[in-house]
């Protein structure tokens, strides 16, 4: 697994905290890892470690840093309600700006060699799509982006290799909406892979969450690693 370190990302409002994982070889392509609504949870940290173990320099910014709230208690029975409230209290454009700052910081790190991609889950899946539309990323992987259906006007601006994962039994993004997302993102003249998973609910990759689907998670992760291998290591 990759080695985890605390870092600070410069922004116009001051330093934004985050976590950085380095690969065993010490350098490699970069990946901006964007959180779910639960913040830099145990699950997101495991994904950061796994991506670093696969050879990437991984930066996960703490996107809730402006809220001055304590870390979420993942054992709280009301954690979903609290997390959704926290996510909706963020100012979207400011959060996009914070994520862009993290992307630029990552690209400038001396241990990052070559290309830089984005991997986002849930809240981060939509945020990553927006970042890819306005900043210089090389690759996008978006897992069930909750905001993505409302961002489809940006689709013509996402002209990089991209991979999308959606469950077809998602309680928050129904199958007809998934079809609309598919139509919009595949209409762009860019390499796009769009994968769906029968019976999988929202957040099916999060093994700490009750929607976790081991089979869909394993298949999506296999596809993600292969996509990153090809796209970030041409």
Image: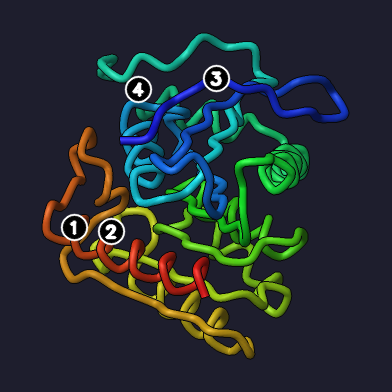
Closer to the camera in the image, 197 or 21: 21
- The location of residue 174, given as percent across then percent down, is 35, 66
Q: Which residue is mark 1?
A: 218
Q: Which residue is mark 2?
A: 221
Q: Residue furthest front?
A: 25
- The location of residue 222, given as percent across then percent down, is 25, 63
- Labels 1 & 2 near each other (Cβ < 8 A): yes
- Residue 149 in the figure: left or right of residue 100: left
Q: Residues within 10 Å of mark 2 (few under 14, many from 20)?
A: some
Sequence order check, earlier mark of 2 and 4: 4
Give the secondary structure at mark 3.
Answer: strand
Sequence order check, earlier mark of 1 and 3: 3
Separation (CA) of disc 2 from disc 4: 25 Å
Q: Which residue is mark 4?
A: 79
Separation (CA) of disc 4 from disc 3: 24 Å
In this view, 126 is above or below 60: below
Give the secondary structure at mark 4.
Answer: helix
Q: Which mark is residue 152?
A: none
Sequence order check, earlier mark of 4 and 3: 3
Q: Which residue is at 76% across, 58% downward?
A: 135
- Labels 4 & 1 near each other (Cβ < 8 A): no
Q: Which residue is at 37% across, 35% downward?
A: 2
Separation (CA) of disc 1 from disc 2: 5 Å
- Labels 2 & 4 near each other (Cβ < 8 A): no
- Residue 134 in the figure: left or right of residue 126: right
Separation (CA) of disc 1 from disc 3: 28 Å
Which quarter of the image is occupied by the N terminus? top left
Q: Which residue is mark 3?
A: 6
């Amino acid at each position: 697994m990759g080695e985890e370190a605390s870092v600070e990302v410069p922004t116009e409002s001051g330093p934004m905290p985050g976590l950085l994982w380095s690969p065993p070889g010490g350098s490699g392509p970069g990946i901006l890892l964007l959180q779910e609504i639960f913040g830099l949870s145990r699950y997101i940290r495991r994904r950061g470690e796994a991506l670093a173990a696969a050879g990437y320099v991984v930066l996960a910014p703490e996107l809730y840093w402006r809220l001055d709230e304590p870390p979420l208690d993942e054992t709280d029975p009301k954690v979903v309600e609290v997390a959704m409230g926290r996510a909706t209290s963020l100012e979207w454009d400011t959060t996009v700006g914070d994520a862009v700052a993290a992307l630029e910081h990552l690209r400038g790190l001396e241990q990052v060699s070559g290309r830089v991609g984005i991997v986002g889950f849930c809240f981060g899946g939509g945020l990553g799509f927006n970042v890819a539309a306005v900043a210089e990323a090389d690759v996008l992987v978006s897992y069930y982006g909750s905001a993505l259906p409302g961002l489809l006007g940006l689709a013509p601006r996402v002209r990089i290799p991209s991979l999308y994962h959606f469950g077809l039994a998602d309680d928050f993004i129904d199958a007809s909406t998934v079809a609309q997302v598919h139509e919009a993102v595949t209409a762009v003249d860019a390499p796009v892979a769009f994968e769906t998973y029968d019976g999988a609910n929202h957040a099916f990759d999060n093994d700490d969450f009750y929607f976790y689907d081991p089979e869909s998670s394993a298949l999506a992760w296999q596809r993600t690693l292969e996509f990153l291998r090809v796209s970030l290591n041409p």
